[in-house]
Amino acid sequence: MKCFFAALICLFSSVSFAKTPPLLVVTEDLWPLNYIENNEIKGSATVLVKRILKQADMDYTLVLLPWARSYKMALTKPNVLIYSINQTPERSEMFHWVTEIPVKVESNYYALSRSPLANKQPSSLKELRIAALIDSVNDAFLSRNKFKNISRVSKISQSVGMLKRQRVDLIIASENTILQALRNNNMQRSDIIKIGSAFNSKPAIALSLTTPQRTVNKLRKAALELEEKEGLCQIMEITPAECVTPSRQH
């Protein structure tokens, strides 16, 4: 009988103190928030995510993948953390949201500088050929607003390449991602022109819906502690002008 109770104590102790399962952390090439350089995943959002994981004492593996693949993994697998992901009405119930990344991202429409669109804003863009990153917030925006001719690509640089070859009339993306994609296509910023703004959004850090609630709570608590002690913008080393205070909705 004594052995039986001793075994029970050991069992409950091992359950109580079992380490939280390691996370798979997925991201995409989205300069300057998250990108790869010299085989190392860098970026201001990457710095923030690593600090939150350290604060929460979480084991993890970090990988950079095409956006659609990262997004699918976060939708379908447990113990997956994804960043930088925009929280939209469509996605609000699809993930556990840890914290916002305190920057504002503006999505714009871009055309070639030599395009007729550079000189005259059309009354409607919805009939034009436009490229967007598949399964992205930009893709969702175009679908929601009933754009007719959407070309969906796996990388932003592909959309810029399509614009360069005049296979599309427009691309939709943020300024920072456009700059990186232009470099990848041997183009200059002067080769394209912004012809209008689409919408603003704030990226965030999220967990797959089947991730244990204990893990969700640990990471939310860690993010809040860092925000109160140091400030998320200070951790990311971004200027006050770039900083947007995270909301308390998570």
Image (cartoon, grey):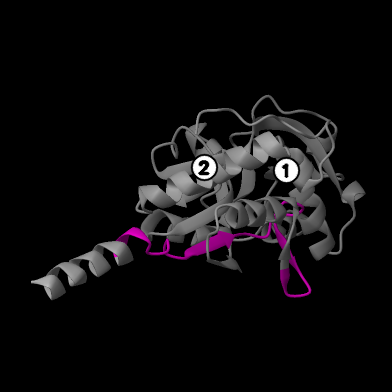
Looking at the image, residue 40 sits to the left or right of residue 135; the answer is: right
Q: Amino acid at mark 2?
A: Arg
Residue at the (76%, 28%) spot, across then down: 121
Q: Is residue 53 visible?
A: yes
Q: Secondary structure at mark 2?
A: helix
Q: Given the current orientation, which residue lies at the most extreme top position? A: 123
x then y, percent, for residue 187:
87, 59
Return the x and y of residue 57 as percentages of the image width and height.
55, 58
Bounds of the magenta span?
15-40
Image location of residue 214, percent across then percent down: 39, 49
Q: Which picture quadrant has residue 197? A: top right
Nearer to the camera, 12 or 125:
12
| Quarter of the image where one finds residue 154 | bottom right
Instruction: Please give the residue where the numbered disc 2 appears in the rendered image.
Output: 220
172 with respect to 81 (left or right): right
Residue at 19% across / 72% down in the picture? 7
Circle 1: is it few (<14), some (14-19), or many (20+) Cα within 10 Å?
A: many
Which is more N-terminal, label 1 or label 2? 1
Front residue of this view, candidates 235 and 46 = 235
* Quarter of the image where the N terminus is located: bottom left
Kindly identify the amino acid type of the residue bearing the numbered disc 1: Ser
Find residue 170 and report its horizontal and vertical position in percent. Answer: 70, 44
